[in-house]
Amino acid sequence: MTVVLFAAGAALWPEYEAPLRAAFAKAGLAADLVTEAAPETVDCIVYAPSSPLQDFAPFTTCRLVQNLWAGVERIVGNTTLTQPLCRMVDPGLTEGMVEYVVGHVLRHHLGMDKFIHGAPGWDQVVPPLARERRVTLLGLGALGLACATALRALNFQVEGWSRTAKTGLPFPAHHGEAGLDTALRRTDILVTLLPRTPETENLMNARRIALLPPGAVIINPGRGALIDDDALLAALDAGAVGHATLDVFRQEPLPADHPYRHHPRVTVTPHIAADTRASTAAQVVAENLRRALAGEPLLHQVDRSRGY
């Protein structure tokens, strides 16, 4: 019997227990799903970084640590974690992110805030068509590519940037330092979907924010640390950045007195852009467990040298 330790916190256990058991059964896995076990008996750990479990050294027979979150920055540096670590790329999470990004891109593209908040008068300024609006995605992983596909289907001029070169994409894709500068200069709406790593910390600093065309919009459902908060606030105050829609922050919940809370050019959403759905995430866990037991390559295994 394969022992699977659910170490993602007691609050998530009622949500995940039934979907995980069903997914294991569907995959033909004889798995004993438990919340407590002798470490030396555990074959797989289903994990969330908020878990009390922080010492992985005793789990000498564990073949897989499956994170339930897309982000792994809070766990990847744990020196006791020598077992294979996989991040969650969940179809439900991806769908949620696509809906959030497309919704807010359309909101800014159409200038909907002006009408939602009841601007007086009869200002018949017609927005451009989507094919005349430039949208750039920073991050071309699974989430970025899914969002790019959806935006292209609406005829937006989509471009992208990633740290390393991406080939064979049906839209312009930049990479590296020079490529980032080029991408920033060529966008009306910027969407940041990068992971948090030492290389992406404060990626959008004052110099790079200044490269954006006047009035550009920033949408950040990626990681709060991607943006230098002081630099963004200064650009917003000066009108250089037209608006920022932010879903992730360095401190969460965002303090009530944080300047973002009250800035007229900022929309704050409470980290709701994309969440792991138990029903679809359970299928990913089951498939990765099957692969681990069969000695096959794992899905979305973390590259420790890159941090994601």
Image (cartoon, rainbow, N blue to C red):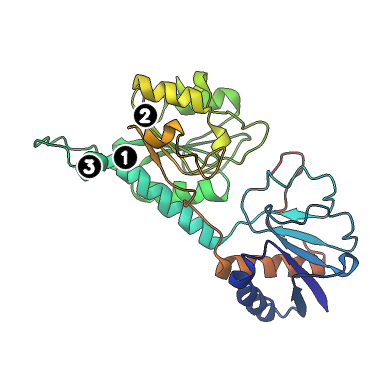
Q: Is residue 213 visible?
A: no
Residue 78 appears left or right of 198: right
**Residue placed at 68% from the left, 48% from the top?**
72
Q: Residues within 10 Å of mark 2 (few under 14, many from 20)?
A: many
The kind of residue on which mark 2 rests is Ala
Residue 17 appears left or right of 248: right
Q: Image quarter for residue 105?
A: top left
- Tag 1 near tag 3, CB within 8 Å: no
Q: Is residue 260 visible?
A: yes
**Residue placed at 24% from the left, 37% from the top?**
128
The tag on residue 272 is none
Q: Nearer the viewer, mark 1 or mark 3?
A: 3
71 shown above or below 158: below
What percent of the width, then of the height, locates residue 294? 81, 69
Task: Tell me the residue that label 3 is attached to.
Answer: 117
Mark pair 1, 3: CA separation: 13 Å
252 shown above or below 14: above
The kind of residue on which mark 1 rests is His
- Tag 2 near tag 3, CB within 8 Å: no
Q: Earlier in the sequence, mark 2 or mark 3?
A: 3
Quarter of the image that includes the C terminus: top right
Task: Tell me the residue that label 1 is attached to.
Answer: 108
